Image (tube, grey):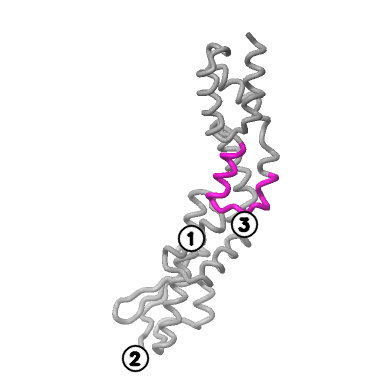
Amino acid sequence: MMMKIERLFPPAQPGRPWTVALSGGETLCVSEGTVVEFGLYDGLELEEETVAGLKTAAFEASLREKAVGLLSARMLSAGQLNEKLMAKGATDRQAAEIVAWVIDIGLLNEEEYAKTLARHYQARGYGVYKIKDELYRRQIPRQYWEQALGELEDPEEMIDAFLAKKIQDPADRKQIKKASDALVRRGFSWRQVADGVDRLRQTF
């Protein structure tokens, strides 16, 4: 079954998709590269196989637009973006190619994402173990963890401030345990917490 291109609309802005209006009222949004590859123009008659190829190209163009939109809204890891694209119906190949593309053009940078996350969670009062959990949960490759964690500030001041706020009597074991447990849950090591408790006791 043949179809015809009724109109081929260029994008309003450079770099945006072209719109292909087919006979029967269907429209497809494709990249400029697809327009050139398929040699599209007004009135061109298309065989069924060509239409199928155009639809695949249009779907991939929509996935690229989706990837750009997601990364413009917030930072993501390659793994997170891959999952979101797969949820939109992308194949393994399509998702992998789009992830490689956004990395290549600089929209996705996992090294910077790791540093941003580490700083964010430290600023919220969390320790290195909690930060590691977040890096893992967001599928950031471990090769970026060490540098991100290495650039964090020494947590000593943060621990001291927390303990000073929560403990009124350093001799009260219940207060000490409650505050210490809370810090451990926030991702600080028992050694860091114990050192903080020692520093607190020295101030009384």
Between label 2 and label 1, give the one nearer the viewer: 1
C-alpha gap between disc 2 and disc 1 = 36 Å
Residue at (52% x, 64% y) in the render? 14
**Residue 189 in the figure: left or right of residue 5:** right
Q: N-terminal of the two: label 2 or label 3?
A: 2
- In the displayed structure, would residue 200 be above or below residue 151? above
Residue at (58% x, 61% y) in the render? 102
Is the magenta region chiefly helix, strand or loop? Answer: helix
The amino acid type of the residue labelled 3 equals Gly
- In the displayed structure, would residue 57 be above or below residue 80? below
Q: Mark 2 points at which residue?
A: 1
Residue 83: which disc? 1
- In the displayed structure, would residue 139 be above or below residue 120? below
The magenta stretch is 128-147
Residue 106: which disc? 3
Q: Where is residue 80 in the image (x, y as percent from the top left)?
A: 51, 56
